[in-house]
Image: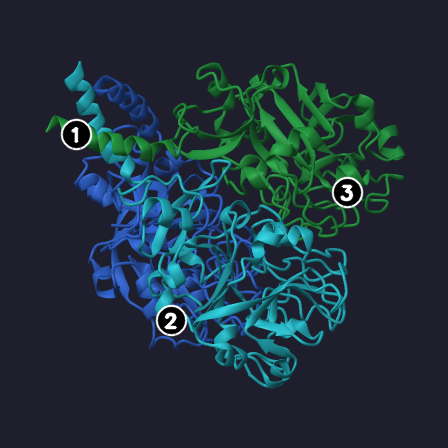
Chain colours: A cyan, B green, C blue
Amino acid sequence: MASRTLLLLTFVSVINICLCQRGRDPPTARSCKELKQKHKFNKDGLYFLRSARGVVYQTYCDMTTAGGGWTLVASVHENNMYGKCTTGDRWSSQQGGNSNSPDGDGSWSNTVTFGTAEAATSDDFKNPGYYDITAEDVAVWHVPNNERVDRWKQTSFLRYHTVTKFLSSYGGNLYSLFKQLPVKYNAGSCPANHGPTVPVAYDVGDATSNHNQFGPNVRANSVPGFITFRAINNERAAMAICLGVKPTSCHTEHSCIGGCGYFPEASPRQCGDFTSLDWDGYGTHAGWSASKQITEAAVLIFYR
Amino acid sequence: MASRTLLLLTFVSVINICLCQRGRDPPTARSCKELKQKHKFNKDGLYFLRSARGVVYQTYCDMTTAGGGWTLVASVHENNMYGKCTTGDRWSSQQGGNSNSPDGDGSWSNTVTFGTAEAATSDDFKNPGYYDITAEDVAVWHVPNNERVDRWKQTSFLRYHTVTKFLSSYGGNLYSLFKQLPVKYNAGSCPANHGPTVPVAYDVGDATSNHNQFGPNVRANSVPGFITFRAINNERAAMAICLGVKPTSCHTEHSCIGGCGYFPEASPRQCGDFTSLDWDGYGTHAGWSASKQITEAAVLIFYR
Amino acid sequence: MASRTLLLLTFVSVINICLCQRGRDPPTARSCKELKQKHKFNKDGLYFLRSARGVVYQTYCDMTTAGGGWTLVASVHENNMYGKCTTGDRWSSQQGGNSNSPDGDGSWSNTVTFGTAEAATSDDFKNPGYYDITAEDVAVWHVPNNERVDRWKQTSFLRYHTVTKFLSSYGGNLYSLFKQLPVKYNAGSCPANHGPTVPVAYDVGDATSNHNQFGPNVRANSVPGFITFRAINNERAAMAICLGVKPTSCHTEHSCIGGCGYFPEASPRQCGDFTSLDWDGYGTHAGWSASKQITEAAVLIFYR
């Protein structure tokens, strides 16, 4: 009887390795930070995590930058800069841009998930960590579209992270922050109702190279070295995240992304995951337009 | 050798708990009813189930209402009442409403799955249980949009379930029922070809509060305390489920949801996951329009 | 202590079977071929596989045809032949057909995944095996839409596979092949820049019955018994796979499917997952139009 049990167990042990961290440790951690601190994983790559409610999912952990323990929770990927709130604009609206959908798809403050870690530079991505993990800081990576996971680090041209543990004041994650500060048309006015502006440290690139990704008009209307969350523009449209800048005017739609469902100015021209980064032409890097490089790169969002 | 084996196995035992019911029991059950009856789980929450063909998925189990053992298999969520068979209308059609797509997306009678349990009040949801589980009765919950799983029970304002074990006459689930009675334009006429009308018992609310969710014209053309499946309207459009009512006329599109791909009357105005609940204005609760409360609540569908 | 450990392990052994091959063997294989050769599985059905990067997924294995070991990696399903690059056209474009999206959704050469094996005849399907597995040959099955997994083999009316191990010359899978030969508008001209034409052996049907699925004009402009990959048409639009034929003219859009995001001729009439199989009417089997049978059947793609 005892030997039979042992035999069975040996068999089982082989089976189970498959769903875990390559046979090394259990996926009972809720975040990459926990995987690193408690379980001593220190290699970048895909790991299984488990949410408080028991949802198991796989995502990418950055275990080395600035101490490591960063969990990829989302990516904003512009699948079609010419599509204005069309299919694939999951971080703004897939409904065309209309005041009837003031919060668009609502992804910033709901529990809908989509995409996969391996496709995070080819499609929008959002996992349960986005609303489950309790974190302090946010990191942003700009990685060229369609890049392979194992090349993200070397091909990213901008990487920065907040350093003030600001998330602790907003419920511990962006889901909670955007519940309080909705990415919704007409939820407030500019500049009175901007959300927090948080300073960042650069891991790749610097404030100047960050600023230089935008056209001259954007540079004249913003300061680099920060992320502003839930920016609002002149027409009361809301955006989720400003890409390494703090806007100094209300033309926020040219450097802040992930918008609500309605942008009144020249509607729906500013509506879409990458809002109006193409206002003066796609990738022209002139006037209010961003560079081709940043326009064709996914924005990866990490928590720690 | 023996001690080495034991060491390995202890390690493995930790790994595997993660993908199961919080370390308590194996996810070999095909339904919440089986989890409750065979494995004695009796707490509401997310569980892993496994289909006959070996597909593993996670869903919500209601283990307490009317004896418990209810499996969440689907939710119908209206993401944009103004979008008429546009993106997100997975229980009707995402193709705009056209006689060329008489059965629309076909979700009621195919094996396509989408969404997640945790997002069932924020997005359409359909899991393998919808077509895999052999059940007798159906329960319907009306839960406000974007509600967290652990608050569904307390915030739902209407919950009712069938009591006649009618599914046994239709193959054991709605997939099978709608294979026999397609949700398809021109599959039959009203009232000759309505599917079954089944009496319900109320767990939250009652027949009167259910009826009062609809405008006066709907109330004058229906009787509460039932679900009619596969209703057909005057123009030969088909709907899947009438929300706690039995239609007494052929204006079924104002209280029955989840439609086919073509609604001839004022096309595409009646096309969409929540059909024409807004015929006399969004949430006006006048004429043929439903209340704002029921318009902005997801319809969760359970089997037992 | 020892007995307590054994008790725990017995419990765990039950848990883990659920996520594996029905308790028989571990899902550590990267392909069905490996499952068959190394682990001696020889029954058709759903299995768990694991990619090199540790992604676990479930797909269908054909363990018997021509030696077995075929992994289902994708299906191309036309959800709406009248929708021209609309929602659901994931193997071409969901953006309407426009020269601004020359490669459309880009699914042939990115790591985005969608759908499930059980719904592969009801919806587009693509799993990590598509880009992860290193294979030699491709098999194609034509299975009627909405067919159950366990009936695919008996209801498929055409099944053929390449025999030259051509994938070895293109990186071992279609992901790699289409990285080299993009399915993109204006990536080349016809016939100079067609990709490889590979002879096939028939497992169900034959070259004549294959050819007869197309209208007379297509038959006059193609030769059956081959697959041509990355065909290009007169207007420089690109298609991924020709359905059992080698085009002998540049009217490739009537027998080759899975196209780029822009088809200039009568745009967007040729744009969609099944391109222009309906040029002379839906399912008419006349002129340039294909039969109703092949128009209403999903195209399943296997690797070995």
| Same-subunit check for callouts 2 and 1 | no
The quadrant in which the N terminus of chain C is found is: top left
Specify whether disc 2 shares its chain with disc 3: no
- Tell me the residue at 26%/55% (across/down): C200
Same chain shared by disc 1 and disc 3: yes
**Of helix, strand and loop, which one carries label 2?**
helix
Mark nearer the viewer, 2 or 3: 2
Residue B179 visible? The answer is no
User: Which of the numbered marks, if any, corresponds to residue B5?
Assistant: 1
The three-letter amino acid code for the residue at tag 3 is Ser
Badge 1 amino acid: Thr
Of A198 and B223, which appears nearest the observer? A198
Return the residue at label 3.
B276
The residue beneath circle 2 is: A155
Q: Is residue C235 above or below residue B92?
A: below
Q: Chain of mark 3?
A: B
User: Would you say B228 lies left or right of B115 here?
Assistant: right
Q: Position of residue A200 (x, y in %)?
A: 52, 68
Position in image of residue B289 (x %, y %): 84, 40
Q: Nearer the viewer, mark 1 or mark 3?
A: 1
Looking at the rendering, which quadrant does residue C188 occupy?
Answer: bottom left
* Tag 2: amino acid: Thr
Toward which corner of the image does residue A67 lie, by quadrant? Answer: bottom left
Where is residue C266 drawn, in percent x and y? Answer: 57, 71
Q: Is residue C294 above or below residue B38?
A: below
Q: How far is mark 2 from mark 1, CA to CA?
A: 44 Å
10 Å crowding of disc 1: few (<14), some (14-19), many (20+): some
